[in-house]
Amino acid sequence: EVRLVESGGDLVQPGGSLRLSCVVSGHTVSTNYMAWVRQAPGKGLEWVSVIYPSGDTYYAGSVRGRFTVSRDNSRNTLYFHLSSLRAEDTAVYYCATVTLLGATDYCDYWGQGTLVTVSS
Amino acid sequence: DIQMTQSPSSLSASVGDTVTITCRASENIYTYVNWYQQKSGEAPKLLIYAASILYSGVSSRFSGSGSGTDFTLTISGLLVEDFATYHCQQSHHARSFGQGTKVQIK
């Protein structure tokens, strides 16, 4: 059974930093695509970041230069380092596994999400 | 960036109804569309990938169609557990979601 458990969400002041964790079981983080998706209160989903098996990364324009995705293969854990936080970063952050099928891909397993609130 | 526009943003329906949700892409994305269901306070769940392929374990009441720029998700014979928010997502370039469609009980 694949299970993803996020943690690290908190109330943080604008300009502050936070590290989110996503502990994964039943699925190997180092050999698979892993994504971070967020959802602001009452809003839709936003694709934020991906880390590839090669270690290459992708970031949405709204977070590029401020957020960093990384992984610890020995702990099978994904991390998301958030810095220079803004009010508009307030959201539930989900980690998800990404399965590739030919030329397409989809998120098939999701964590329960962790809430980040940016406010003074 | 590819924009995904869902319609309607919300709809009201009764148990047993058939509902259709539409997603329009800002450019040709072939069949690179996925659909997710999200219940209040929960994470999204994958329903359909590649526009029309039902994900493992998902009820056949759900179906998807479309190619190019126009896609639909159809739910036949609505059950109480189907009242939720549905999201489309393109997987052609740089990934993006529609704004979601909330299906409410009439």
Image (tube, coloured by chain):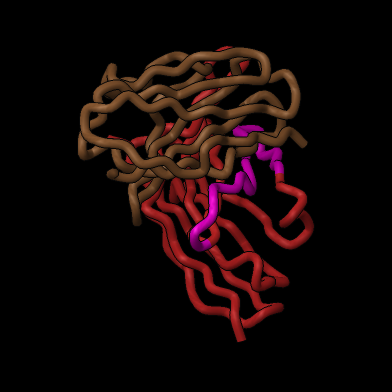
Chain colours: A red, B brown
Q: Locate residue A28, reporting x and y percent.
A: 44, 36
The N terminus of chain A lies in which quarter of the figure?
Answer: top left
Magenta span of residues: A41-58
Please tell me which residue is depicted at 32% across the width and 37% down the height of the picture. Answer: B13
Task: Name the residue at the front extreme.
Answer: B106
**Is residue B60 shown above or below A97?**
above
Q: Is residue A18 above or below residue A110?
A: below
Does residue A30 show up?
A: no
Left or right of B7: which side holds B106?
A: left
Q: Quadrant of the C terminus of chain A?
A: bottom right
Residue B68 appears in view: yes
Say which quarter of the image contains residue A109. top left
User: Residue A48 colored magenta?
Assistant: yes
Q: Is residue B49 left or right of residue A18?
A: left
x, y percent for residue A57: 69, 42
Give left or right: position of B80 versus A82. Answer: left
User: Is residue A49 highlighted in magenta?
Assistant: yes
Look at 45% across and 24% down and name the residue there.
B73
Identify whether B59 is placed above or below A24: above
Q: Residue at image x 56%, y 33%?
A: B89
Decide if residue B81 is on the left or right side of residue A27.
left
Report how many numbered discs are placed on residues in the image: 0
Coordinates of residue A46 in the picture (x, y in percent): 60, 48
Q: Residue furthest bottom?
A: A120
Which sits in the foreground, B13 or A38?
A: B13
Identify the residue at horizontal 48%, vertical 48% (top origin): A95
Residue nearest the viewer, comparing A70 with B48: B48
- Residue B21 location, x and y as percent? 47, 29
